[in-house]
Image (tube, grey):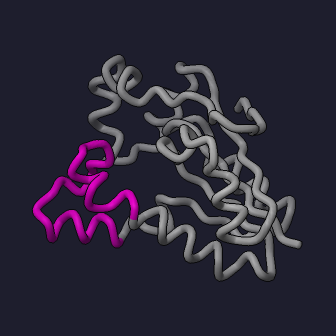
Amino acid sequence: MPKLHIICGAAGVGKTTYGRKLAAEIEACFLDSDTVTESVVRAGMLAAGMDPDDRDSPEYKVAFRGAVYESLYAIAAENLPVVPVVMVGPFTSEIAQTDWLESLKARFGVEVECLFVSCDEEIRRDRIEKRANSRDAWKLVNWEEYLEKSAISPPVFQYQSVRT
């Protein structure tokens, strides 16, 4: 039976790279929250008069965060009957909910595992600089403030730790 693999962690820790590698190894459908929804989110933000590079404001979170994750879940649901799915995203609120994995198991009817990815802060900053994404400009200019605001604690449920 296919399995859902959740890859979570902060920006720049290597979630996408690790998730791609895992998906290739297990011949799974690979779903990255940025890739799956980025063009629609940017268009929506522009149409709403919002900064298309914003992913941290309360306005973004109210307008788009839920829809981004629901899009991932819908695509996962389409694929899980036939192949494993590797789903990549920060999942910051979700990993603080003790029953989140159980709710995903009930929703999709498959086994779910969570992998929490982390790395040293110097490596993280270097990766963010090298990817040269316009969404990261504020993070890099305000690095210390960003680190404080973006601290992601490990999940409150059973997970596998991955250091990259």
Please name the predominant secondary structure of the magenta segment in the image.
Answer: helix
Displayed quadrant of residue 111: bottom right
Q: Quadrant of the C terminus?
A: top right
For the point 25% across and 43% down, the residue is 57
Residue sticking out furthest to the left: 49
Counting from the top left corner in percent of width and height, residue 10 is at 52, 36
Q: Quadrant of the N terminus?
A: bottom right
Q: Is residue 112 above or below residue 37?
A: above
6 relative to 137 in the view: left or right: right
Counting from the top left corner in percent of width and height, residue 118 is at 64, 30
Counting from the top left corner in percent of width and height, residue 148 is at 38, 20
The mark tally for this picture is 0
Residue sticking out furthest to the right: 1
For the point 48% across and 62% down, the residue is 69
33 relative to 112 in the view: left or right: left
User: Between 43 and 90, which is closer to the camera in this rendering?
Assistant: 90
User: Between 154 and 140, which is closer to the camera in this rendering?
Assistant: 154
For the point 57% across and 25% down, the residue is 123
Q: Does the stretch in magenta take in 57?
A: yes
Q: Is residue 101 above or below residue 144?
A: below
Q: Does the stretch in magenta take in 103?
A: no
68 relative to 108 in the view: left or right: left
For the point 15% across and 71% down, the residue is 47
132 relative to 13 in the view: left or right: left
Q: Which residues are magenta?
A: 40-66
User: Between 107 and 51, which is closer to the camera in this rendering?
Assistant: 107
Counting from the top left corner in percent of width and height, residue 39 is at 36, 70
